[in-house]
Image (cartoon, rainbow, N blue to C red):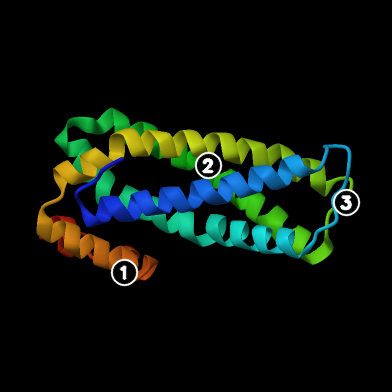
Amino acid sequence: MHTDSQTGQLLHDDHHRTIDLLNAFETYLERTREDEIPHLDADGRVLLATLGKELGQDLERHFILEERCLFPPIAAAGAYEMTADLSADHEALRPLFRRIARLCALALREGFDEESWPVLRHFGQQLIDGLVLHIQKEETALLSAVDAVLTPAQDVALARAYRHGEEALGGVDERASPLHV
């Protein structure tokens, strides 16, 4: 997806990084049959640690940017149904993120056993399916809407806030947010 805004490009970059991670995770899950318990090697540990961080922090930051700073003006511009659908996806994905992040942390501490491996495989595939679909929706609809609703000044301010972390987004007074400039 082509995007003209810095904010849209940051979201697009997040999407590509996440898709790459999900592809690696899917390959990892498929490497071992469901009834086999894999040994957690160094590559698997790095993957699970990265996945846990992505689900525990990075994707939540991404969702906060969209929900607090992008969905309201996009909905006000007439795309309420799209933002409602994407918000519903976020709410459905969050418990899955938390579950997979906990399973990753548990596996990093204790390895896999006959209970934890099938659970990770099951919920991992749900995560992959749900998040890939969500990213496809955002790539096809949200990014162009971001370009349409943000002024250049709002785009620069919002992209800067996003680059500086959740605190910059979460701590912004609604009246002083980049979208109310």
Q: Nearer the viewer, residue 73 or 49?
A: 49
Asked whether, in this view, residue 16 is left or right of residue 34, the answer is left
Which one is in front in this view, the residue at disc 3 or the one at disc 1? 3
Residue nearer the viewer, 89 or 15: 15
First of labels 3, 1 by sequence position = 3
Q: CA distance from mark 3 to mark 1?
A: 41 Å
35 over 42 or under it: above or below: above
Residue appearing at x 16%, y 61% in the figure: 175
Taking the spot 64% from the left edge, 55% from the top edge, the residue there is 101
Distance from label 3 to label 2 (Cα)?
A: 25 Å
Lateral position of residue 81 relative to residue 108, left or right: left
**What residue sits 32% from the left and 63% below the top?**
162
Percent of width and height locating residue 81:
29, 28
Give the labeled residue for mark 3: 113
- On residue 46, the disc is none
User: Where residue 109 sits: x, y (%)?
Assistant: 79, 66
Do tag 1 and tag 2 residues touch (Cβ < 8 Å)? no
Instruction: Tell me the kind of residue under disc 1.
Output: Ala
The residue at which mark 1 appears reads as 168
Mark 1 or mark 2: name the one nearer the start of the chain. 2
SS state under label 3: loop
| Residue 70 visible, this angle | yes
The residue type indicated by label 2 comes to Leu
Q: Outermost residue toward the top?
A: 81
**Residue annotated with mark 2:** 93
Q: Is residue 88 left or right of residue 5?
A: right
